[in-house]
Image (cartoon, rainbow, N blue to C red):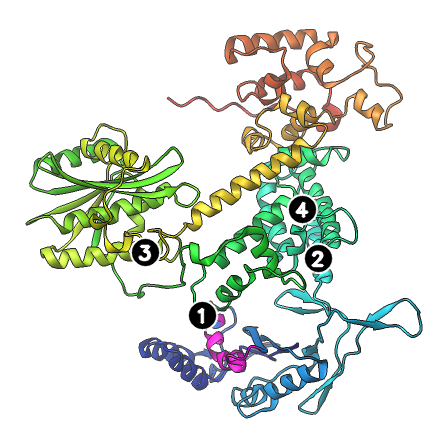
Amino acid sequence: MIFLDVKAAFPSVVVETLIHNMRKRGIPKEYTDWYQRRLETRKTILSFDNFQSEPFNIPIGLDQGCPLSPITFLFYNADLIGLGGDRCDILTLGFIDNTAFTARGKSFEEANEKLLELMNHLGGALEWSASHRAEFEIDKTFLICASRNRTADPLHPGRYTPIKQPPITINGHRIEATTTACKFLRVFIDQELRFMAQASYAIVKETKYILACKCLTKVSKGVKTRMMKKLYKAVAVPKMLYAIEVWGTTMLQKGTSKKEKGWNARGFAKKMESVQRVAATLITGGMRSSTTDLLFAHADLLPIPALIHKHIGRAALRLATLPPSHLLCKELKSALQGRRRHKSPLHHIAETYQFNPDNFETITPATISPKWTSKARIQTMDNPDAAAAQDAESERLDIVCIYSDGSRQNGNIGGAAVLRRKGHTVKSIRMHLGKDTDHTVYKGKVIGLILAIELLKNTQRPQSVSLALDNQAAIHASVTSKPGPRQYLWNAFHTNLKNVMQTHGLDHIKIRWTPGHTGIPGNELADKEAKKTAAGDSSSPRQLPKQLRPKKRQGQALPRSKSAAKQELYSNIKEFRKEIFNQSKRAGHALKINPTLLSSAFLKLTKDFQKRHTAILFQLCTGHTPLNHHLHWTAKTPSPACDYCGHHRETVTHFLLECAHFSAQRAWLCHELTYKAEAHARDLTTLLSHPKCVHATLKYIHATGRFKKIFGDLTPPEEEKPRD
């Protein structure tokens, strides 16, 4: 493998060559002409040391910071990336100014010869560099001879060293093969492709950001809990798990000894967990002695194994929904066949998740022209009463009203449509999709719209038509061309809609919102038909649109939905998280205090609290709090006894429910909870996790003054008044 870096990539772009490459790749002339005019009319000035030049033209280069520059540079170096062609022993990769050539051979010398051929032959990389004024920076050119084969070390019997790596000479420059890892697209690649350097780098990056976050929050003050968690998930996690599907797939392996695969990876996972523990401490305000499992549970953070499964699982879903023309789609199908030795990251992903592209929907980057406009007009009312009145008016007039809906029943999904005219039901159509692990209710609603168009197709002389649906997200998606899940269904909807409008001579079709379960007759009928369909009662295939009929070869009508597979993946991760937590000795006691622990309930409970309130509440829930019983356990105080009443152990239960010194404050707490929250004050679960009781508990803690030296003023924020 040889890694190349283009020197001064954007400033050295030749505008005429860029426009030529864009036209060669099929970009319309109107776009290239506009972009050429934009680049040729640029001017700038130089200003330094009280000198300012006259404005002058910039004939070459792309604008730094412009969002179009990275996109257009991909066209500029497309010929360089495509040098490998269809050869199976050559692979070229690149993004903007970073390019990598990989060659496979029986020896390092054979592979290096293939790399030299790519660089030196007619039309090769060096010729591209000269014609495009893009010089390769020699100082940033690296060579790696990748192999896990080793030879015996003559100086140290019993030891083995990597095979000697021959150098390569390019354009008169001798490039020695590196023995350390080199960085390509922010991923460190080493000689044996074990990615240990990348894993270490990921831990260093996460540690760096977590230590920076320490400056923003303390136990008694600083950034609130919910903001601290958002900062961690938005910055630290993406930095740590960048390209985890490439270098972290061995963490999916199971084993108990060093000889088993994944041992080194699990060691790195433990280190990542240690760093995430620091983040959880900053989020919750816990003490350093707080246990990791309770920190993660209250901060609603996934354990590192579950977090890795989540990120790699999402990458597996993206791979499974790639179009057949994509290079990785074919490679994933090949990896699904399995391999016993020398497994690549793709083999690990295929073996773990078993996502077959043949069973999934295909998501392409773009399926519709940017100039496309929908033939439908949408109408959504802010007021449900106004929507119901509009529906009644449509029923009264001679308007063809078609109601559609999707539903889940007993783990199955169905979609249906009902056509009504002048308040009378004319006909209906239904389609059973399958299990909810393969399809979603939203998908059933989109199917309902397609079935509505099929009903309209066989309707005689419709003067005005309106489609009614109780899902505003689907209504707004019907007039957009954004690629994503279910795009093949939207394409079928727009195609059928266009054909029906031409057949009946309609100028437009209105799609309006009808609120669900409000007594609208048509909407209730559509909901009833959708539930019947989900139970298995479907119309005959001949009555369905051609795009929805079962295929003879596959035996199924619709491919598996990416959204449904993601929901199942997340559900499995939640179960995996519960399994990990239940293995802890503290799980039973923690769930007694807070039954909703493995969720975001604690964060929602403390979303409006200052950091000191969240910290003291978390410490009381876990028992790791500055009371004498815990401080004696950590060797901070000589005795665990209570300093106020002399009880032999000052625990959380003693402080909140038993200490005689605070009997007056406790009497007020009992009165407050009994007459306002209708709760019992002799229960830790009520005091520490009930939404209506937490404010009273904080007032009690503030009134006792027990933690004033540590947290200062613990006056809780005012409670939100209930809405009318």
Magenta-colored stretch includes residue 488 = no
Q: In the rendered image of this protein, does residue 379 appear above or below residue 192?
A: above
Spot occupied by residue 199 in the image (x, y as percentages of width and height):
70, 57
Q: Nearer the viewer, mark 3 or mark 2?
A: 3
Residues shaded magenta: 70-88
Q: Nearer the viewer, mark 1 or mark 3?
A: 3
Callout 2: 10 Å neighbours few (<14), some, many (20+)?
Answer: many
Kindly identify which residue carries mark 2: 199
Q: Calculate the distance from the C-alpha at mark 1 to the C-alpha at mark 4.
A: 33 Å
Kindly identify which residue carries mark 4: 213
Q: Nearer the viewer, mark 4 or mark 2?
A: 2
Mark positioned earlier in the residue sequence (3 or 4): 4
- Under mark 1, the amino acid is Leu
- Under mark 4, the amino acid is Cys
In the image shown, does 210 or 193 lie closer to the viewer? 193
Mark positioned earlier in the residue sequence (1 or 4): 1
Q: What element does badge 3 sit on? A: loop
Kindly identify which residue carries mark 1: 68
Q: Residue at x 61, y 18 (%)?
A: 685
Assign the magenta stretch its main secondary structure: helix
Mark positioned earlier in the residue sequence (1 or 2): 1
Callout 1: 10 Å neighbours few (<14), some, many (20+)?
Answer: few
Please give left or right for residue 181 compared with residue 244 in the image. Answer: right
Kindly identify which residue carries mark 3: 552
